[in-house]
Amino acid sequence: MTPQKRLALVAKHLRDHFGPVGAGRAEPPLDLLVRTILSQHTADRNRDQAYATLRDRFPTWEEVLAAPESELARAIQGAGLQRQRAKRLKEVLERLYRERGTLSLDFLSELPDGEAARWLLSLPGVGKKTAYIVLLFGFGRPFFPVDTHVARVSRRLGLASDQGDPHALLAPLVPHGKERELHLHLIRLGREICRPQKPRCAACPLLDLCPHGRKETR
């Protein structure tokens, strides 16, 4: 079975197990970018707390741009690495305003996929996972972000390895149109079943497709 067919089966099994993913709440792409920057190397709870505090103190991105870095750092300290993150946020907003004259990422909708991705990746502190999250969830573009859960599950399934860029390895395998649902389902599987320690392989809907799981349940 080819890797493409295998990942298509993974997507089907996960949909059968977890059910279809709803449309979700629409979020402006710049809000999503900032939230994702705050999520790097921290728990979702800490990210959400830091983002809520930031928006409470500075309701508009213009106010964030005008605020001293020290005040931004205090607002987002719940996410950790607050000085580094505050500096990055300022740099991103300054670059956006300098180039576009407005604090919005809506202009990316007019660019081809590759050009939009390159622009986001040129921002300070923005890697593929962050850029692809913005493009997938903010614009509905066919990108497949790989976080720690997706990478772990993919390695255990034999679809990725510790070597090389997991985004480059997985992107050609993902069924077209299934990027969003598969991404969310793999994250849920990684949190609930395919955990870093003591994975619940016997309860996994992908056991028949997973070399690691079969080995663990012998």
Image (spheres, grey):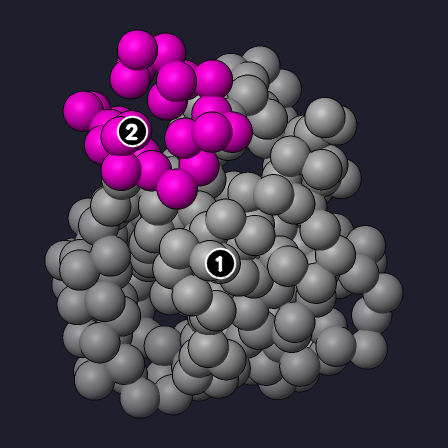
Q: Magenta stretch containing residue 164, yes or no?
A: no
Q: Quadrant of the N terminus?
A: top right
Q: Can residue 23 be spotted in the picture?
A: yes
**Span colored in magenta:** 194-218
The one of 63 and 209 positioned closer to us in this rendering:
209
Per the model, the C-alpha gap separating discs 1 and 2 is 18 Å
- From what the image shows, is residue 20 above or below residue 206? below
Name the residue that disc number 1 marks: 15
- From what the image shows, is residue 86 above or below residue 108? above
Residue 171 in the image: x percent, y percent? 70, 41
Location of residue 160 (image quadrant): top right
Tell me the element at label 1. helix
The structure residue drawn at horizontal position 27% and vertical position 38%, both measured from the top left corner, is 203
Q: How dense is the environment of label 1, judged by Cα within 10 Å: few (below 14), some, or many (20 and up)?
A: some
Q: Magenta stretch containing residue 202, yes or no?
A: yes
The structure residue drawn at horizontal position 85% and vertical position 65%, both measured from the top left corner, is 112
In the image: residue 127, left or right of residue 75: right
Tell me the element at label 2. helix
Location of residue 167 (image quadrant): top right
Residue 37 in the image: x percent, y percent? 41, 56
Q: What label sits on residue 201 in the rendered view? A: 2
Mark 1 or mark 2: whose residue is earlier in sequence: 1
- From what the image shows, is residue 152 above or below residue 36? above
In the image: residue 76, left or right of residue 169: left
Residue 33 in the image: x percent, y percent? 48, 65
The structure residue drawn at horizontal position 39% and vertical position 42%, both measured from the top left corner, is 205
The one of 120 and 189 positioned closer to us in this rendering:
189
